Image: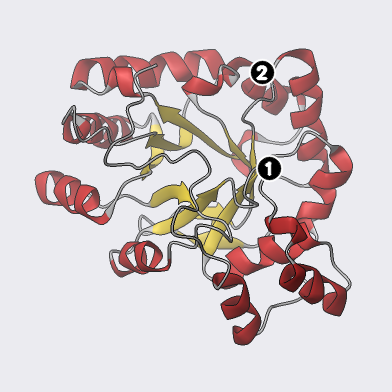
Amino acid sequence: MSIPEVTLNDGHKLPNLGLGTYQLKGGSGLQQVLAAIKSGYRLIDSATNYDNEGIVGKAIRMSGVPRAEFFVTSKLPGKYHDYESARDAIQESLARMGLDYFDLFIIHWPLPKRGLYVEAWQALVDAQKQGLIRSIGVSNFEPEHLDRIIEKTGVTPAVNQIEVHPYWVQEENLLENLRRGVKVQAWSPLGRGSSALKEPIVQEIADKYGKSTSQIITRWHLDRGIIPVLRSANPAHQREDLDVFDFELTNSEITAINDLNRADGRIDGQDPNEYEEFE
């Protein structure tokens, strides 16, 4: 299937739906990523902390699809936030993947208590100038974190990957990113083990369109201007997740799903202002 593209603030184009590779590892992970590529996925999202950059890179090289058709992402872990460590980590990630450049490289968490994310961002800016990265971005950054790196470096992230799903709608945060020209990607867009897929309103909308509840939630992201990064190890589910570009939700349906938002809706309670990720 052909996936539509969106244009980032740096002019590069990004597929409007991607494959998350969290927990896809080893030989089985290799086959699962290859199956996704065969189904049409071109945005492949990995991270140093997923311990699978080697397998992901191998799948890309084995797929027979030209490298230029992929949009490959990886992420910088917290223990490498100081400038020199960040520069080295980017090069090590490329070596593990067996690639010459990343299409997107992002800071995984801001770790504001540590206070080094501006250094890390400067390392990404410089690596982009060096040609190691085409687009640079962040993950789990709050508006104040975005403003600080923009003010200090003059460079606005192309992407901010944040937790978004029906129990954690993030409407205000979404708008703050869009105002700054930052595209939002959603991690755990279906709610990872939550009961969102079984919500009566989601099932009702799914019945109307002849779609699965996961397809409805995926479409909800797309209609809000969010790029969902969906993790599935099952080839059938991977194909199903792509079959969402032949319909749109109404504004009232989007609002009805938004109304599932919870005050404590985060999956693991990971507040970006508090969460410490050093591995």
Residue 171's label in the rendered image is: none
Give the mark nearest the N terminus, 1 or 2: 2
Count of labels in the image: 2
Give the amino acid type for the residue marked by disc 1 in the picture: Gly
Query: Secondary structure under badge 1?
Result: loop
Badge 2 crowding class, 10 Å Cα cut-off, few under 14, some 14 to 19, many 20 or more, is: many
Q: Is residue 195 left or right of residue 70?
A: right
| Residue at point 59%, 45% (across, down) | 188
Residue 250 screen position, x and y as percent = 66, 84
Residue 101 screen position, x and y as percent = 46, 29
Q: Can you identify the residue that label 2 sits on?
A: 55
Give the amino acid type for the residue marked by disc 2 in the picture: Ile
Q: In the figure, 112 relative to 168: above or below?
A: above
Residue 105 quadrant: top left
Q: In the figure, 165 relative to 85: above or below?
A: below
Front residue of this view, candidates 6 and 235: 235
Q: Can you identify the residue that label 1 sits on?
A: 193
